[in-house]
Image (cartoon, grey):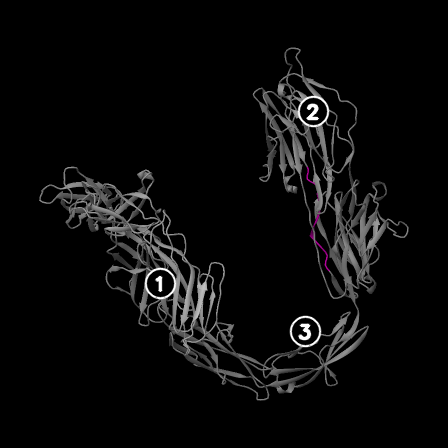
Amino acid sequence: MQLHQTNWGIIEKSKWIVKLSGAPVAIISVILVSISLFLIESEEFGPVFIQEPDDVIFPLDSDEKKVVLHCEARGNPPPTYSWHINGTELDSVVDYRYSFIDGNLIIANASEVTDYGKYQCKAENSYGIILSRDAVLQFAYLGAFSGKTRGGVSVREGQGVVLMCTPPPHSPEIIYSWVFNEFPSFVAEDSRRFISQDTGNLYISKVQPSDVGSYICLVKNTVTNARVLSPPTPLTLKTDGVMGEYELECFALGNPVPTITWRKINGNIPKKARLRKSQAVLEIPNIQLEDSGTYECKAENPRGGTAFKGHLQVYTLPQWVRMINDTQMDSGEKLQWECKATGRPRPTYHWLRNGLPLTSQGRLEVMNGELTIHKVHQMDSGMYQCVAENKYGAIYSNAELKILASAPVFVSNPIRVIATLGKDVSLECKPRASPKPRITWKRGDRRIQPNKRIMLLRNNTLRIVNSSRADEGNYVCRAENQLGSAEMTAILWVKEAMRVELSPTRVEVTVGESVVLSCKATHDTSLDVVFQWFFNQKLITFQSDGSHFEQSSTVDLMIRSILLKHAGKYGCQAQTSADTVFAEAELLVRGPPGPPGVVIVEEITDTTATLSWTRGLDNHSPISTYNLQARSPFSLGWQTVKTDPDPVTGDMESAIAVELNPWVEYEFRVVASNAIGTGDPSAPSRGVRTKEAVPSVAPANVSGGNGRRHELVISWEPVSEEFQNGEGFGYIVAFRANGTRGWKEKMVTSADSTTYRYRDETFPPLTPFEVKVGVYNNKGDGPFSKVVIIHSAEGEPREAPSDVKAYSISSSEVRVTWKPPNPGPGRPRGYEVSYWKEMEQEESGKKQKTVKNETSMVLTGLEGNSLYLVTVKGFNSIGQGPACAAVTVRTRKAPPAQPPTNLMWIQEGNNVSLSWDPVKAKDNESDVIGYMVLVKQEGRGHNQVTRTINPSTLLSLPEGGTYIIEVHTLSEGGEGAVSSQVRVVTSSGKLKVTKSNQCSVHCLPRSLTWTALLLVLLVPSASW
């Protein structure tokens, strides 16, 4: 058995392994955690722990050689601290290794030899002393295995074997595992192999040839994580003949591998218990005292079985059942404290006062968990601790005892009491004093003697019954103890009783109306009166209820826009310093009826539902009619249904909903109405489905057409599930050629179908058919739609377009034109143009479709001076028709790449004469057919375009501003490259011409710009 100390309390971990010949070994893990907290605070008080020291396990090989034990307490005045080890006080002056920071203890260069033990923190102030729980300081280490070579183990195949670990010295717990042959090949636990975490031994219940090898025990410290390996233990197989008899142990050894079962004698195994390691381990988490008992482990295989019984005894750290609390007492009173704890073994108790033990002597009695002090004195004040402990630890309950001692003192003096004539009045006498004072009352110079009308109560209150004017005057209460005396004067006035009148006392109104309740009080004019209004005994808060309640300056209550919830009792309370009077009035509110009670569906058919309900509140106006409503997955919310009888009068509590749809799930509710209005609906009934019936609604919008050649396409709008009336719903499609007699009928089994296609190679395109579509379900056939005429499909286009022509527009564009095929079945709805280069395959070419039924198209993005093949075919919704024979077309040569150069211009007046060098096309370029001059005024979106066949032109610039001018080459292949831009900036809206007819001459060579300024400034510009 092992004990483990943690920060939370004592954990007892009991593992037992029992070995019997032919009997299994049983392992039980037991864990217990105990926690206790307390916190009490007052204005001036003795020490109370905030943090007590916890157990510490310190690794010896740690780089940080300091151990810190924490302790913190609060108190007023603040407490001071000292520490004890194994009952001896630590002195930081004598041993420099100890230091104190606040309440914490720091141990430098800690060593197991000098510092191992139990530590206790003591906190004290002028009110007393308290001791903390014990904290154990342990040291973690892991030694090395013995270096002695281990002998081999030889066993026959099929027998069991135990390999011993024999761990080195260590503290605290270690974890065991085994390495097979070489690290890190670990032995895996299963139904055949088991590693005890108590001894470290490896159990193999049935040895196999694969088990032969070298075994090494590896142990790991749980705190330091240090690991060490044992010398290897060789395992070999004996080969000297027949196997002997089996020896079974628990953990069970055997061949075949035995199975293990568990049971608890005279009880059930706890539900929280878990079986691990092939049922060899029974683990009971969160162990409790009730888990104690006798457990049986049974091991069985086909050769037989055996069992072992073991008793589990659960031990626990004490836990508080009753604790002591801070107490204040008067001197001379009797103190009786009791503390009580549970635990096993049963805890013992002792008491401490200011950290020192208490024993029975004189006025003080100590009996187990009870402490009694007779006639307490001031010297008994201090900090008390009840300690409950057993072999697993101790717990502390702390409390402060304060003994009060003071002469009588009255907080309020004198006091004024106003009584109501004819009623009882009480004059209280409550001095502060300790010990309790002796009380006497007097009026004037005479001591008051109790009688039938004037009584002195046990709490020293003077009570006057049926007070009168004669009782007015001064009353003196005298309090006296051994520390002094004090007097308090009570001045009594007796006033006339107050009367309150509330009108009207009962009123009926209708929802939406308003009413005023008037409250008047008759009282002594020397007293102020305060009014309060109540609704059903609850105070009305006008700030939050102001939308309906309003209090006028005359104390009347106005209730505006009354609702049903405002019905009830209204109270007016008038209060003076002498009296409180309460009067009530009842308000009845007429309104629409309340919701009817539960709606029950008593009978259901395919189109009706019999409903019943219970009456709701009529809200003071008789119910005139009921309205029945239904809701289905197909309705837009709740809908009123027809009823039998109609109408449903207010004295009825059942009716039949009629004209429902078959095979639809409905919910029903009932709404009541009266002369004032319609009320809230009842809660919905449970959902019910009407019974099935033959369909009654035929498909709508039967139509058709299109489709492929020799195909008749029939379509319709599907019937909503709401009108399918039952399961197995489908459609019957009937059709016949126009003029024939017999109908062909086809079944469509899908309720969601909207189309049926019928194919027959014998009928020509556009053959007219008479068509109708019916419905059916499991109950039978329903109606057909009206007969409509639908033509069979005309098919895809049959002929190719004719007169197809293609001609080049530019170096990248070709226009294609054609004529549609002859009218007839298979009319095209559009055309597709295919084109590809002469050296390419048609499949790699490109295709373009017309938007509608156009008969021309411009192909763009082509290569210049290239031969293309072009075909055209028609298409419609059925498919594509045949293509025409391919036509050829060659795109024009590309436009000249050389732009116009050497731009020159002459500025005269508002005219600009512009000229440039002619552009000559190369052999692979289109001939020049002219030039295009673009003029754009900055800030305007409009361009001025001038075309000319000559390398010059005359431009007019009528407006002032800045102009951009550029020249393009025109050719059969399209527009050529653009010239450099020139910018013209004018200084006025209109150019002026001098008398000498001066003009400006400008030129724009390739690499130089020369500018002369007269009236116009010309500069080059970036392209725009």
Q: Residue furthest bottom?
A: 525
For label 1, the crowd category at 10 Å Cα-Cα, with few meaning under 14, some 14 to 19 and many 20 or more, is some
Residue at the spot 64% in from the left edge and 85% down from the top edge: 493
The CA distance from mark 1 to mark 2 is 82 Å
Which one is nearer the viewer's eye here, 683 or 312? 683
Query: Does residue 246 appear in the picture of this structure?
Result: yes
Which one is nearer the viewer's eye here, 669 or 161? 161
For label 3, the crowd category at 10 Å Cα-Cα, with few meaning under 14, some 14 to 19 and many 20 or more, is few
- The residue singled out by tag 2 in the image is 215
Residue 32 lies, in percent from the top left, at 67, 43
- The residue singled out by tag 1 in the image is 681
Q: Work out whether mark 1 precedes mark 2 in sequence or the reverse, and give the earlier one.
A: 2
- When asked about the image quadrant of residue 943, the answer is bottom left
Q: Work out whether mark 2 precedes mark 3 in sequence or the reverse, and give the earlier one.
A: 2
- The residue singled out by tag 3 in the image is 457
Where 791 falls versus 621 (above or below)?
above
Amino acid on which the number 1 mark rests in the picture: Pro
Viewport quadrant of the N terminus? top right
